[in-house]
Image: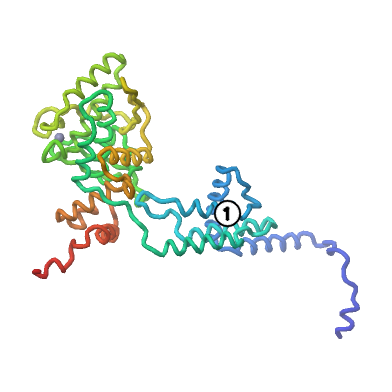
Amino acid sequence: MSSAQLVALPAPMCAPEPEIGDELRELEEACRALEAHTLSANTRRAYEKAWRSFSGFCDIYGLDAVPAHPETVRWYVAWMSTQFDEEGLPRFALATVRQHLAGIADRHLQEGHLDPTGHRAVSDLVRGLAKLRATRPRRKYPLLLDDVLRIVGAMEHDVYPAGISAARDTAALWLGFAGALRRSEAAALRLNSLELHLIDGIHVRVGQSKTDQANALPNVVVLPYGSRPATCTPCALHRWIALLRISEKGDPQECRRAMMAQLFAYQLDEHVCGAQGGAGLITNADLTSGTALLRATYRNRKSARIHAGGVTGDALHTMLLSRMSEAGMNPSDYGFHSLRAGHVTQARRNGASTEEIMRAGRWQKAETVNVYDREWNPAARNSVMRLGL
Ligand SMILES: [Zn+2]
């Protein structure tokens, strides 16, 4: 057949009438199956996650997600760039930021809109972020033992009502430092997560940690008796839980009197935890309920109440920063994670092995511990210290 004949053929005016409907339907299904494979399953999931995050952001700020204005995408990039995790590291890596933009572009093109992520204002911002991220991220500074003692020492422990939140905050600080707990783990503790142990001090069952999702068995964190009451985590927990138990009693007048009696008797030269064989302020019978351990407190100048609900991890973070300010310390570059980082750093400086630190901090990989060493203990396990200089 020559090309002239081909040109002469009349073009169909409309789509052919399907006489073989079922077969065409099958072809249409095949088309859809192929279309579903234009993106890998991983990419598709990443795009869906990116879209949920972006449309959630737009909901919060009352912006249109589709079609989105380039300005909206610019703000979204700025928002991603300012999100940090507990260690002070970026929540959105640069590659993730780029993937989110690809997800937004994909959704727009699919729905027949112009791609807002291609705008110069957006790409400039991403380039700026790439330059900024090229430098090392800053982790939260560690708080060492002396720092924790200074913060706790600046609180008013033996007055009412300030002593109530001081008791809670002291317990939270020692949980973070001695227990190397993440703020989410500390906030999630229940009274029945704790068990008084005659020899060891206190055992704490910490739920699934973020790096250990598949492990159904909870980790047991040991909080040993302090060599002196000032550094005794069990003492701090006995004091706080005793106040909390008093607050659960019915009569407000009686409850207030009992709280005052406990606070006014506060002294730091003797254990209240049973470390020296005596009775502690609480017993295991006080640790049977599944209610929150670290609870919100409400106070005015004259009185205070302990709420039934627990504090959030964010509240613990904010508490630490304001307690640091009260102790005359500059809280920038610190966070609740500074206590966990401080545990590692202090333990290493005192000669702890990697294995010991991994057990306490519930780390699976030695590499994680080494990251802290690189940042805060460059002299630890370093042969330069063995040159006889
Ligand atoms: Zn004690």
The single residue placed furthest to the front in the displayed view is 328
The reply, left or right, for residue 52 in relation to residue 370 is right
On the image, the x and y values in percent for residue 249 come to: 29, 18
Question: Tag 1: residue type?
Answer: Val
Res. 173 image quadrant: top left
- Relative depth, front residue between 348 and 76: 76
Which quarter of the frame holds ligand 1? top left
On the image, the x and y values in percent for residue 253 come to: 29, 14
Which quadrant would the C terminus be assigned to in this image? bottom left
Q: Identify the residue at image location x=86%, y=63%.
A: 14
Q: Identify the residue at image location x=53%, y=50%.
A: 53
SS state under label 1: helix
Check the image and tell me how it is coloured: rainbow
What crowding class fits label 1: few (fewer than 14 Cα within 10 Å), some (14-19), or many (20 or more)? many
Res. 308 image quadrant: top left
Above or below 346: residue 224: above
Q: Identify the residue at image location x=24%, y=16%.
A: 257
User: Which residue corresponds to mark 1?
Assistant: 73
- Relative depth, front residue between 289 and 165: 165
Please tell me how many numbered marks the rendered image carries: 1
The single residue placed furthest to the bottom in the displayed view is 2
Res. 183 image quadrant: top left
The reply, left or right, for residue 321 in relation to residue 71 is left
- Relative depth, front residue between 40 and 90: 90
On the image, the x and y values in percent for residue 301 come to: 32, 22
